Image: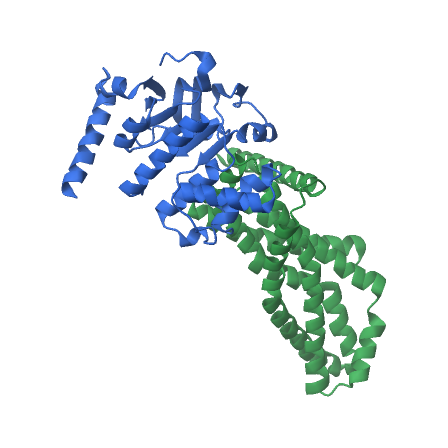
Amino acid sequence: MNPIQDLGLRTVSLIAHLGRLTAFVVQIGRNTVRPPWRMQRLIDEIYDVGVLSLAIVCLSGATVGAVLGLQGYVTLSRFGAEGSLGAVVGLSLVRELGPVLTALLVTGRAGSAMAAEIASMVTTEQLDGLRMMSVDPIDFVVKPKALAMLIAMPMLNALFIVLALFGGYLVGVQLLGVDGGTYVSSMEGSINLEDDIAGTLLKSLIFGALVGMIATYRGYTSEPTSAGVSAATTGTVVTGSVAILLFDYVITALWGV
Amino acid sequence: MNAIADGDARVRFDDVHLSVRGRSIFRGLSCRFPRGKVTVILGGSGAGKSTLLRSIGGLVRPQRGVITVAGVEVSRLPEHDLFEVRQRIGMLFQHGALLDSMSVFDNVALPLREHTDLVEADVAAEVERRLTAVGLPGTGALFPRELSGGMLRRAALARAIVADPEIVLCDEPFSGLDPINVRRIEKLFGTLNRQLGLTFLITSHHIPSSLRMADQIVFLLDGAAIAGTPAELRHHGDARVSGFFAAELDAEAANGDAA
């Protein structure tokens, strides 16, 4: 095969892939707005995505906040602007680091697990078993997982930001001696509810939808082999992380959040 | 081709050509599976026994030819329309295919909860009745990972028959079972077949049980089917067919002697 043929083949394959992904997403969307709702399965999945990610999100949030507080203080003190530490930590967390880092963490922990679980269900014929019982696997398995990701992501993002603000406060105020009132008031004065809080919510919702779609799609379309499970897991983390960063830029450029 | 009249056939294959990943499995396969009878599908490894069962459920589609289940052509039916046909079918997969995130009870109860209006007490009674029938009473609280291979397959069989399907597809139901459980499952198949008139399609390498149970045997060879009664196929003119029976029975006898 010459390079031109190879390029053509890859292009056609990419387009086919995108077409299948679109059809998959449309099917999830269609199933979401019609019964059965399967609330218990959704709650179980929210537990898997949300509650089981709490430890890693809280720990990472506090650490990132502490680092931001430290770095921000060192940089701001060069200009005698330590009083703006709360604003710097708050704005960078709410507008950018909170949603992006939470999404990356959740992709690594819950997204990969989601893809691996579905892929292993493909390998062990569990999805075929559902089909033979006239139970739609998209409805029974995929929809609750994708929705759980969409619902849990903003909540985890909020938690990450709160813990990070606390970490920044601990380092900036308790350790480095910035005035506590100044830290909090500069944060309050700089964070806007309409732009910043709505923006972080929008970003985390979009990231949640993206990671949910990518993880379930990679698992659902995996090869029924152990290599297929591995490829679905790796593919979810790689594709999910790149998609999060790309969409972060697009959202920021389009809406300025 | 056996001499079963078309009106009696619950499942029909007509000139089916099917390839999977470029490998030709069926090349003009035609056969009939009669209503209310037990048909055992035999053939060497890779002959397409599991593929035949999967194609009846519409899990794989032929490139050419027609597959009819209970009067409905499934080979070209859209996925969503297949759900109605599949409610008439119960399938036991080779490795059970139980949902590993759910208990045995929830697995067996799933078809009832999805497709009937039974209250939970009736579901529980029906599930326990089926688990007892396959020799697994009181195992509902266990998870699939806690069962042995044989127990897993019997739990999957309970799930396959819990909703009283018209057609039961069983992929290697005796694989990994001890002789007592082979007899138990044989007896269960016989009871369901006689009392409820269920149509059984069973793939197997277990020749003694096949000969005991089968009303008809379909032997897959070179992508086509040779059908007949157990006696007819044991003494078939093609040495590859009759030889298969002789070799498998010899192996069984040798195993019996060794034991």
Question: What coloring was used for the rendering?
Answer: by chain
A193 over B249 or under it: above or below: below
Q: Quadrant of residue A74 in the image?
A: bottom right
The colour of chain A is: green
Q: Position of residue A205 (x, y in %)?
A: 72, 55
Residue B17 lies, with reference to residue A133, above or below; the image says above
Q: From this viewpoint, is residue A19 visible?
A: yes
In the shown orientation, is residue A106 left or right of residue B31?
Answer: right
Say left or right for A116 vs A31. left
- Among the chains, which one is blue? B
Which residue corresponds to the image point at 59% horizontal and 69% vertical from the top-left? A55
Which percent across, then down, holds residue B46?
Answer: 34, 31
Q: Nearer the viewer, residue A100 or B58?
A: B58
Foreground pick, B216 / A232:
B216
- In the current view of this chain or complex, which residue is farthest to the left? B257
Q: Quadrant of the C terminus of chain B?
A: top left
